[in-house]
Image (spheres, rainbow, N blue to C red):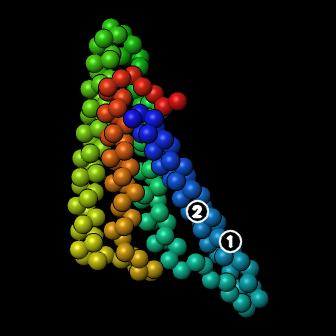
Amino acid sequence: MNAILWRAADLFALLGGVILLLIVLVTTTNTSAFILDRIAGAFGADVSGLPGYEDFVQLAISGAALMFFPFCQANRGHVAVELFMDRFPETLQRGFDRLWLLLTAGIALFLAYWMVFGMLEARDDTAVTAVLGWLIWPFYLPGIASMVLWALVALAQIRAEVRHA
């Protein structure tokens, strides 16, 4: 089961990276169009930027940012106060670790729960982006899935001291 969770965490991080790459490419294209427009303006011409650039970036980053959380959790890439915890006995350290993992899973599920309500409200309101007119609610799905996967990875780590390989 852990191998499936770790692969899913890897896949989410990979997809998040691809989305970030697309954001960079779109931003570079839009910035280049801005610079070319300034140059073309000197010759009486114009070059337009990408319509709806902000819409795309806003929607894409909202999912991509959350897609890295499960991978980070699988690799125990979170902040730990080791200077303080190292002074406790090993059993107490494990107990605190499991408590924080349970709290992390709870917070991730809490966020997923409220994101579902936000998605349903956006769907019921038929909320769309300002320029492109894209429906907003489908872009909640990667974030909700990421929060659930994050919680599952944390719960798997409670069962055993497992780390992503």
Amino acid of disc 1 = Ser
Residue carrying label 1: 32
Q: Which mark is residue 22?
A: 2
Please say if the residues under marks 2 and 1 sit with CB atoms less than 8 Å apart.
Answer: no
Marks 2 and 1, how far apart in space?
15 Å
In the depicted view, which residue is nearer to us: 150 or 118? 150
Q: Earlier in the sequence, mark 2 or mark 1?
A: 2
Q: Position of residue 75 (x, y in %)?
A: 47, 32
Label 1, secondary structure: give it: helix
In the depicted view, which residue is nearer to us: 160 or 111? 160
Horizontal relation, residue 43 to residue 130: left or right: right
Amino acid of disc 2 = Leu
Q: Position of residue 95 (x, y in %)?
A: 28, 18
- Residue 59 in sight from this viewpoint: yes
Q: Is residue 160 above or below residue 109?
A: above
| Image depth: mark 2 or mark 1 in front | 2
Furthest-right residue in this view: 43
Residue drawn at (32%, 17%), measured in percent from left and top? 94
Figure quadrant of residue 3: top left
Q: Position of residue 78 (x, y in %)?
A: 42, 33
Residue drawn at (73%, 84%), measured in percent from left and top? 40
What crowding class fits label 1: few (fewer than 14 Cα within 10 Å), some (14-19), or many (20 or more)? some
Q: Position of residue 108 (x, y in %)?
A: 30, 44
Residue drawn at (46%, 72%), measured in percent from left and top? 55
